Image (tube, rainbow, N blue to C red):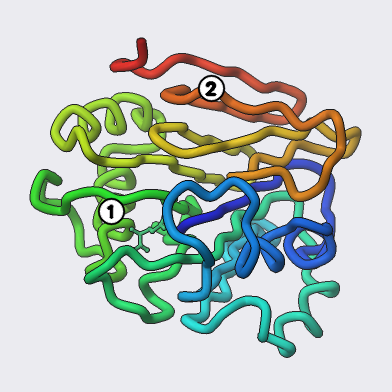
């Protein structure tokens, strides 16, 4: 995924997070402002959210900007915990809905913004797709999200060229890593947004430094340097 967004807070509509903001994921699908790798995110999109504890997902291999059915339904989808992404496929990776984040193990939703050499990743449970991000997600699910920081540091050491920005949520917690790409946080009165780039020009957006773990719970945000950060 090349741009992702997570929400933890009061129930809000998916449209208000993804489609309505002036520089939200819909606009980022054709005009991202801070993307360092790739120009547009036209290779698909995915939205996952928690609905009374159940994971719900809607993924597509088509560009988000043209999906009028999703635009019609998204105002009616409300959740207090959302992970959404738009994709710029890495060269050689499949373009299909199952290669589009968020991935899930049934408890967590997970998006990866970056690239990793699948050859360095230890064998795991079956991944949802052969795309590098799905294989990495399977490893993270196997290891457990409580060990996300260690897993990312280990993969980063095994593949020094990897970019490993992860965003994951389980309904009551939002976790993210920065490893080679941008991430910003917005603390609103009704919740917290983590996003690859700000969806508007509100002055409260703050940039997260590279090689950090962000751990968001209800009323709590913790920032920790990852192993391998200078
Ligand atoms: N490598 C992943 C893919 O091909 C993610 C790409 C990205 O972050 N741009 O989908």
Q: Nearer the viewer, residue 32 or 140?
A: 32
Q: Nearer the viewer, mark 1 or mark 2?
A: 2
- In-image side of 185 versus 175 (left or right): right
| Residues packed near mark 2 inside 10 Å, few (<14), some (14 to 19) or many (20 plus) | some
* Residue furthest out toward the top: 230
Q: Give residue 25's mark.
A: none
When the figure is inspected, residue 187 is found, relative to residue 136, above or below; the finding is above
Q: Residue at x 46, y 63 (%)?
A: 101
Rate crowding at label 1 as few (under 14), some (14 to 19) or many (20 or more) other CA atoms within 10 Å. many
Asked where in the image residue 228 lies, by quadrant, the reply is: top left
Q: Position of residue 73 (x, y in %)?
A: 78, 81
Q: Nearer the viewer, residue 112 or 199?
A: 199
Report which residue position mark 1 lands on. Answer: 138
Q: Is residue 197 above or below residue 77?
A: above
Q: Pick out the residue farthest to the bottom.
A: 69
Residue 78 quadrant: bottom right
Residue 22 percent location from the top left of the image: 83, 58
Spatial separation of the CA atoms under disc 1 and disc 2: 26 Å
Secondary structure of the residue carrying tag 2 is loop
Residue closest to the eye, 66 or 33 = 33
Mark 1 Cβ inside 8 Å of ligand 1 = no
Q: Residue at x 68, y 50 (%)?
A: 81
Q: Which residue is mark 2?
A: 209
Q: Residue at x 37, y 32 (%)?
A: 148
> x, y (%) of residue 77?
78, 70
Check whether the beta carbons of the residues at disc 1 and disc 2 lie within 8 A of each other.
no
Outermost residue on the right side: it is 189
């Amino acid at each position: 995924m090349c741009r992702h967004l997570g929400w933890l807070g009061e129930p809000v509509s998916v449209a208000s997070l993804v489609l309505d903001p002036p520089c939200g994921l819909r606009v980022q699908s054709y005009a991202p402002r801070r993307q360092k790798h790739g120009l547009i995110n036209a290779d698909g999109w995915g939205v996952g959210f928690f609905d009374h504890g159940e994971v719900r997902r809607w993924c597509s291999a088509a560009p988000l900007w043209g999906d009028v059915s999703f635009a019609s339904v998204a105002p009616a989808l409300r959740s207090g915990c959302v992970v959404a992404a738009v994709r710029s496929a890495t060269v050689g990776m499949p373009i299909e809905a199952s290669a589009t984040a968020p991935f899930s193990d049934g408890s967590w939703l997970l998006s990866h913004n970056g690239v990793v050499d699948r050859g360095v990743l230890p064998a795991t449970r079956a991944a949802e797709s052969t795309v590098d991000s799905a294989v990495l997600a399977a490893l993270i699910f196997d290891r457990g999200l409580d060990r996300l920081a260690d897993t990312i540091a280990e993969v980063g050491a095994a593949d020094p060229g990897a970019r490993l920005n992860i965003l994951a949520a389980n309904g009551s917690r939002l976790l993210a890593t920065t490893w080679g790409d941008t991430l910003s946080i917005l603390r609103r009165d009704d919740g917290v947004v983590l996003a690859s780039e700000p969806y508007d020009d509100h002055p409260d957006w703050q940039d997260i430094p590279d090689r950090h773990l962000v751990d968001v719970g209800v009323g709590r945000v913790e920032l920790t340097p990852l192993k391998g950060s200078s």
